[in-house]
Every structure is written in C-alpha cells, then in structure tokens.
Amino acid sequence: MAKRLSKALRGKRRWVGVIIPAGIKSKQEAIKTLEMFLATYDLIQKPRLVEFNLNHLSDGRSVGIIEVKLVDYPKIRNILEGELIDDGNQFTSYTSSGKIRLVRERIFSLE
C-alpha cells in the first residue's frame, strides 16, 4: 500500500462559496458551464465544484462550493468578481476560506 503524504506536503487549497445563476438547473450543467468559462484561463489545476444546492435562494439562484488550489486562488477570485458568463449570467463569489466548514456555514445561511 502506498504511503500517504503528510498534511504539510499535501497541496494547499481554498474553498470558494459561489452564487450560481438561476438559469443553471443541475450540478452537471454548473460543472460544464464553469469548465467552459475557465478553459481560457491559465490555471495550474481546474477548479472543482464540490457542493451544489439547487434554488437555495428565494430568487431561484443556487449556491455552491468550489475547491481551488492556493496558487490559482487570486486569479479565480478576480475572474468570479468581474467577468460575465454567457448571456449576462454570472457566477458570483460570496465567501472563501481555507476551511470548507466555514464556507458551508456562511453560504448555506443565506436566504
């Protein structure tokens, strides 16, 4: 059996809580849209949609959590804060942390 890396040697990451546009109705659709959008950017590793909660907000928008490598984190934050996807729909960064528990608490307490 392979030896497991120590915590210090594992890659560092950040968790980003995002608000997903109302036009996206499934986790697969959100993953596909996010991958297509970020394909044009030079990232070390593509971000991964870890959690998706459909229609969590009252206006039909959804929330999700994206795992991002630490080296890509500044680029991803700039992208999510300023750029549009498709026809005016936008993934919006709401919160971020090095601990997924904190992002879950913040993003799922939204109404």
Image: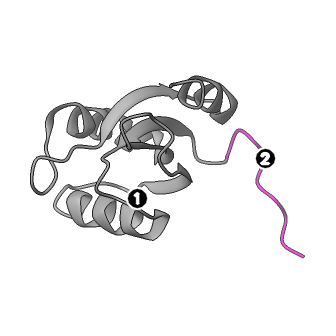
Q: Earlier in the sequence, mark 2 or mark 1?
A: 2
Q: Is residue 22 shown left or right of residue 94?
A: left
Magenta-tinted stretch = 1-9
Dot 2 surroundings within 10 Å: few (below 14), some, or many (20 or more)? few
Discs 2/1, front: 1
Q: Main secondary structure of the magenta part?
A: loop
Q: Residues within 10 Å of mark 1 (few under 14, many from 20)?
A: few
Residue 74 lies, in percent from the top left, at 31, 32
**Disc 2 to disc 1: CB gap under 8 Å:** no
Residue depicted at 49% across the width and 55% down the height:
49
Residue at the image point whose x is 40% and y is 61% from the top: 25
Q: How many marks?
A: 2
Report the residue that reaches farthest toward the right.
1
Q: Is residue 2 magenta?
A: yes
- Quarter of the figure with residue 95: top left
With respect to residue 110, does 47 lie above or below?
below
Viewer-proximal residue among 79 and 27: 27
Residue that mark 2 sits on: 6
In the image, residue 12 sits, relative to residue 42, either above or below, namely: above
Image coords of residue 72 (percent x, y): 36, 43
Residue 8: image quadrant is top right
Judged from the image, the secondary structure of the residue bearing numbered disc 1 is loop
Instruction: Give the percent coordinates (x, y) of residue 57.
Output: 45, 35
User: Taking 68 as reference, is 102 left or right?
Assistant: right
